[in-house]
């Protein structure tokens, strides 16, 4: 019976901490995302497409796709294999999952995150001259 009481006390303490922490986190404020609604998704195999990012996120999923992103992208996420993305401008981040992905961008200072390389896969994320 004593063990049960201790477990309930620990649970009660954790619940109380969550109840107190949530309003504090909301009062401090969370950064507001600057991306627009209407992210662009390109999904498939062997697609060649030129599009306007329109200050939104570009998400490419599949294999062997070639996407040219004009204008400004909030962020780019690429998943799959052998995709190529060339972007004019990226503001926030470029995240690459998978193998043999290439993301090239001309302008911006995005955070570069190569999740594939973390697992020993080879990808390329580079700034290139306009």
Image: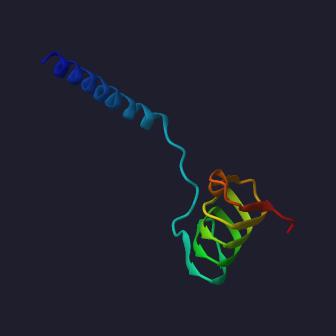
Q: Position of residue 98 (x, y in %)?
A: 61, 63
Residue 43 image-quadrant placement: bottom right
93 w.r.t. 62: above or below: above
The furthest residue to the front: 120
Question: How is the protein colored in the picture?
Answer: rainbow
Q: Write the residue at 43% across / 38% down.
A: 26
In-image side of 93 versus 128 (left or right): left
108 w.r.t. 49: above or below: above
The furthest residue to the right: 129
Q: Position of residue 89 (x, y in %)?
A: 74, 64
The furthest residue to the top: 2
Count the marks: how many?
0
Of 99 and 28, nearer the camera is 99
Of 109 and 13, nearer the camera is 13
Camera sees residue 108: yes
Q: Quadrant of the N terminus?
A: top left
Residue 41 image-quadrant placement: bottom right
Q: Write the residue at 85% across / 69% down.
A: 130
In-image side of 35 versus 8 (left or right): right
Residue 100 image-quadrant placement: bottom right
Of 78 and 101, nearer the camera is 101
Camera sees residue 94: no
Q: Write the residue at 54% across / 68% down.
A: 39
Q: Position of residue 17 (x, y in %)?
A: 34, 26
Q: Position of residue 125 (x, y in %)?
A: 74, 60
In-image side of 128 versus 25 (left or right): right
């Amino acid at each position: 019976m004593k063990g049960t009481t201790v477990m309930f006390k620990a649970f009660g303490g954790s619940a109380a901490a969550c109840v107190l922490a949530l309003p504090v986190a909301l009062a401090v404020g969370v950064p507001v995302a600057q991306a627009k609604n209407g992210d662009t998704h390109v999904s498939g195999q062997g697609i060649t497409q030129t599009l306007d990012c329109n200050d939104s996120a570009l998400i490419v999923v599949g294999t062997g796709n070639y996407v040219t992103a004009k204008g400004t992208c909030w962020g780019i996420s690429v998943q799959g294999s052998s995709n190529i993305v060339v972007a004019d401008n990226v503001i926030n981040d470029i995240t690459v999952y998978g193998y043999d992905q290439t993301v090239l961008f001309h302008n911006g200072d995005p955070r570069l995150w190569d999740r594939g390389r973390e697992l020993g896969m080879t990808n390329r994320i580079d700034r290139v001259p306009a």
